[in-house]
Image (cartoon, coloured by chain):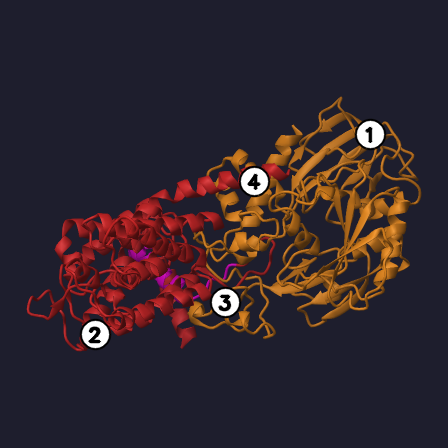
Chain colours: A red, B orange
């Protein structure tokens, strides 16, 4: 079976190398690269290489997000997998076009970006707005910088920011769809569905959601925010397999708590700390976006600074701006500051070295 | 030329196939005054001859520099010479010998000639070639090998070994040198008593790990030297086999015991020095012969000659079949330091050893695996980005480009399969050649 597939891909790939069908050759190359590991050999020492590769590394994020998506599908219906399918399809298409123009193979980065897009949109977002976000995010968040590994901003957040500014009501509505078991129904943008405000919006009107809803769920919000427990579980998995660095997360949460208590002294009415953590997109943003290694800093010290920067921004923005949710802005702002943090910590390290040698 | 004296014993077979001609029959290599040096080799192209006619070159200073397969090679002679003529195209240098041998005295000279040790010594702190005129203040002798395919660990009497070491360095004239024995937990189990000149450093077995000397440096080097006694140390690093060569152990004179890994003849191979390895091993054309550890070794091309300092051979293959959906499989048979691969949890499961990259080459994803494993405390991905992508070598030097120890671990762990260590070595070579100008 595998041999037959191998033969088929090889044959088709060989036949489309030249001739009139040359333009679909990259498609076979991409399928080949996606399904089979390469047969390149190490030309120089070290002659053995670690089994970890970029595909496996990236796919671990998908594994961590799967339980969240499964639960969302149960509560929001089959629109969730449809959105995932759309995000992957459009992602692969855009990625493929750029890879073709750059004459490279398609890289696996859109596996993560695609799933993140689904996590950070409410299910009521019309599919055409969602598609615009995906295409914009991948082109202007990633491809214009030169593809995976070169991007400065998180592509999913760039896409979300674009549609957030263009169609705020569709992306960050005042009332979210109330989660209920509707596995087999399609959720449109209909007004007749039962809606409820997100916990943070509820707080602005003076109500506080109970802790069980906040922590275990299901709670209203974006698709990925359905259950804090599952996000924490996914995040801990990513930390355990060393895809996500714990330093960023630790600094972020510490900074949120610290900023919360520091502001409570003079800023008057603050939301309770549990709402700060579990009410909005903080957990999702921390474990799945802020910890993204590509857009994050590189040294240990700058990871602490970067995490603390995001955490402090989240609390300050929530308290002093009319925005209900602020995690997206904080992370994008921090992404922009990363080169500065990295350069600063490198300079500090140099100073430290000079004292010894 | 029939009257060429092939300095085979001097240079080590195929690897450094220098030829020296005097234009007349010379019985003893020490007696000649005019020489002709041919620098053409089958495997190492000497890219640059760094001398010009009329120059007076001190012994030990480089005459020609090449970028080798793994390392930068410098060729130098052990006596002062005056360059008479240089034929850059045919890589021929004629010179006049102006002094007697500068390196070392007595019968030790022959041993140095036979193993050409002075070409291989590098100072692990500065990364530069070891200056043969300076006495090192610290010498590290490694008694165990953690590198896969790097040879067996020393199982003999450590105490006797340390006495031998003191003797050797006294013979060298290095009386004040401090000797550090690098051993692992099991070797030191008997708690032997040592001469006070010997300092014993105990290491845990770590895999994958390069030479224990590099492991040792991790303690000192990240932010420079914290131990003031070792600051500005001249360090040398001697492996056990080299030490036996220095002592002149009979066992290593004409025959060499070589460990063979990953081959049907796994075990110890007792074979003559300078012999061609291929018929001993019955390797096919698909096989690759790696000498000296899989992480830092050299690959032998074609008919491969064994050199006395090489103590292990590993036969590996190129990957043959392409596995489907490899990234979804648990991976018991692959070697990894990542918890994403099942063999991380089952360290003793049988492994497939081949030379496959096991992944596509990608842009750096900033995962920091390289900086976590770097024994010198560097950040290889940043070094690579500043030197190769941003091509600012000065900044790379500030970040410690020269401190790279060439252990190759960054290339080993990189999930994006970037040839980090090779790139860093390349730029180290550029810096070194700029320094020499």
In the displayed structure, does residue A77 sit left or right of residue A337?
Answer: left
Mark 2, Cα crowd under 10 Å, few <14 / some 14-19 / many 20+, is many
Query: Residue A235 in the image: x percent, y percent?
Result: 38, 65
Q: Disc 2 to disc 3, how far (Cα)?
A: 33 Å
In the displayed structure, does residue B375 sit left or right of residue B3?
Answer: left
| Front of the two marks 2 and 3 | 2
Numbered range of the magenta stretch: A18-40
Q: Residue furthest top?
A: B54
Q: Earlier in the sequence, mark 4 or mark 2?
A: 2
Mark 3, chain letter? B
- The residue that mark 4 highlights is A352
Dot 2: what SS? helix
Residue contact at pointers 3 and 1, CB within 8 angstroms: no
In the displayed structure, does residue B223 sit left or right of residue A143?
Answer: right
Dot 1: what SS? loop
Q: For residue A31: magenta?
A: yes
Q: Disc 2 to disc 1, how far (Cα)?
A: 85 Å
Q: Is residue B57 above or below residue B412?
A: above
- The residue that mark 2 highlights is A75
Picture quadrant where residue B174 is located: top right
- The residue that mark 3 highlights is B339
Residue contact at pointers 4 and 3, CB within 8 angstroms: no
Q: Main secondary structure of the magenta part?
A: helix
Query: Residue A37 in the image: x percent, y percent?
Result: 45, 65
Q: Is residue A341 above or below residue A314?
A: above
Q: Disc 4 to disc 3, how far (Cα)?
A: 33 Å
Q: Earlier in the sequence, mark 3 or mark 1?
A: 1
Mark 2, chain letter? A
Mark number displayed over residue B80: 1
């Amino acid at each position: 079976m595998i041999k037959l597939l191998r033969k088929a891909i090889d044959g088709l790939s060989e036949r489309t190398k030249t001739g009139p069908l040359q333009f679909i050759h990259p498609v076979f190359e991409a399928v080949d690269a996606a399904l089979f590991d390469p047969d390149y050999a190490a030309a120089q020492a070290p002659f053995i290489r670690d089994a970890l590769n970029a595909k496996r590394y990236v796919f671990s994020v998908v594994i961590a997000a799967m339980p969240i998506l499964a639960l969302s599908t149960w509560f929001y219906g089959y629109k969730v997998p449809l959105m995932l399918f759309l995000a992957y399809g459009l992602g692969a298409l855009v990625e493929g076009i750029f890879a073709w123009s750059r004459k490279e193979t398609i890289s696996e980065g859109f596996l993560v970006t695609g799933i993140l897009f689904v996590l950070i949109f409410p299910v009521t977002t019309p599919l055409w707005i969602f598609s615009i976000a995906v295409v914009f995010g991948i082109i202007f968040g990633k491809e214009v910088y030169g593809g995976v590994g070169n991007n400065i901003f998180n592509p999913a957040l760039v896409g979300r920011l674009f549609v957030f500014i263009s169609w705020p009501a569709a992306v960050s509505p005042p009332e979210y769809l109330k989660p209920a078991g509707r596995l087999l129904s399609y959720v449109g943008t209909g007004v007749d569905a039962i809606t409820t405000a997100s916990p943070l919006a509820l707080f602005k009107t003076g109500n506080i959601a109970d802790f069980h809803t906040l922590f275990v769920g299901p709670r209203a919000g974006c698709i990925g925010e359905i259950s804090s427990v599952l996000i924490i579980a996914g995040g801990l998995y990513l930390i355990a397999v060393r895809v996500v660095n714990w330093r960023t997360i630790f600094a972020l949460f510490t900074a949120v708590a610290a900023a919360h208590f520091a502001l409570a002294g003079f800023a008057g009415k603050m939301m309770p700390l549990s709402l700060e953590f579990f009410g909005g997109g903080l957990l999702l943003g921390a474990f799945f976006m802020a910890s993204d290694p590509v857009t994050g800093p590189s040294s240990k010290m700058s990871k602490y600074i970067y995490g603390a920067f995001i955490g402090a921004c989240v609390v300050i923005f929530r308290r002093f701006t009319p925005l209900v949710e602020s995690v997206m802005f904080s992370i994008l702002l921090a992404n922009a500051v990363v080169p500065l943090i990295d350069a600063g910590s490198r300079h500090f390290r140099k100073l430290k070295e000079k004292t010894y040698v | 030329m029939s009257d060429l004296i092939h300095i085979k014993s001097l240079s080590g077979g195929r690897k450094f196939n220098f030829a020296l001609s005097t234009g007349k029959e010379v019985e003893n290599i020490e007696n000649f005054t005019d020489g002709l040096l041919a620098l053409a080799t089958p495997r190492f192209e000497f890219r640059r001859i760094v001398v010009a006619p009329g120059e007076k070159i001190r012994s030990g200073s480089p005459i020609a520099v090449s970028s080798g397969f793994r390392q930068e090679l410098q060729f130098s002679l052990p006596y002062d010479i005056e360059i008479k003529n240089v034929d850059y195209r045919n890589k021929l240098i004629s010179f006049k010998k102006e002094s007697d041998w500068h390196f070392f005295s007595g019968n030790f000279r022959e041993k140095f000639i036979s193993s050409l040790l002075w070409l291989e010594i590098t100072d692990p702190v500065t990364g530069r070639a070891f200056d043969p005129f300076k006495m090192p203040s610290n010498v590290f002798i490694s008694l165990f090998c953690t590198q896969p395919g790097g040879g067996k660990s020393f199982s003999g009497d450590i105490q006797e070994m340390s006495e031998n070491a003191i003797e050797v360095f006294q013979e060298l004239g290095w009386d004040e040198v401090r000797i550090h024995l690098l051993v692992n937990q099991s070797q030191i189990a008997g708690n032997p008593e040592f001469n006070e000149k010997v300092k014993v450093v105990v290491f845990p077995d770590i895999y994958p790990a390069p030479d224990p000397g590099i492991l040792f440096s991790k303690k000192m080097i990240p932010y420079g030297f914290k131990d003031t006694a070792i600051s500005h140390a001249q360090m040398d690093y001697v492996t056990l086999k080299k030490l036996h060569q220095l002592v002149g152990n009979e066992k290593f004179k004409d025959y060499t015991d070589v460990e063979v890994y990953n081959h049907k003849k796994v075990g110890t191979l007792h074979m003559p020095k300078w012999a061609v390895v291929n018929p001993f091993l019955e390797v096919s054309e698909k096989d690759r012969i790696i000498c000296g550890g899989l992480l830092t070794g050299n690959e032998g091309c074609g008919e491969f000659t064994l050199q006395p300092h090489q103590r292990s051979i590993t036969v590996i293959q190129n990957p043959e079949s392409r596995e489907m959906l490899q990234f979804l499989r648990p991976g018991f048979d692959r070697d990894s330091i990542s918890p994403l691969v099942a063999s991380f949890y089952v360290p003793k499961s049988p492994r497939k050893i081949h030379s496959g990259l096991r992944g596509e080459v990608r842009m750096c994803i900033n995962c920091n695996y390289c900086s976590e494993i770097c024994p010198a405390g560097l950040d290889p991905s940043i070094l690579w980005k500043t030197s190769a992508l941003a091509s600012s070598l000065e900044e790379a030097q500030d970040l410690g480009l020269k401190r790279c120890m060439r252990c190759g671990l960054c290339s080993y762990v990189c999930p994006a399969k970037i040839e980090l260590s090779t790139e860093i070595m390349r730029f180290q070579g550029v810096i070194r050649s700029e320094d020499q100008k």
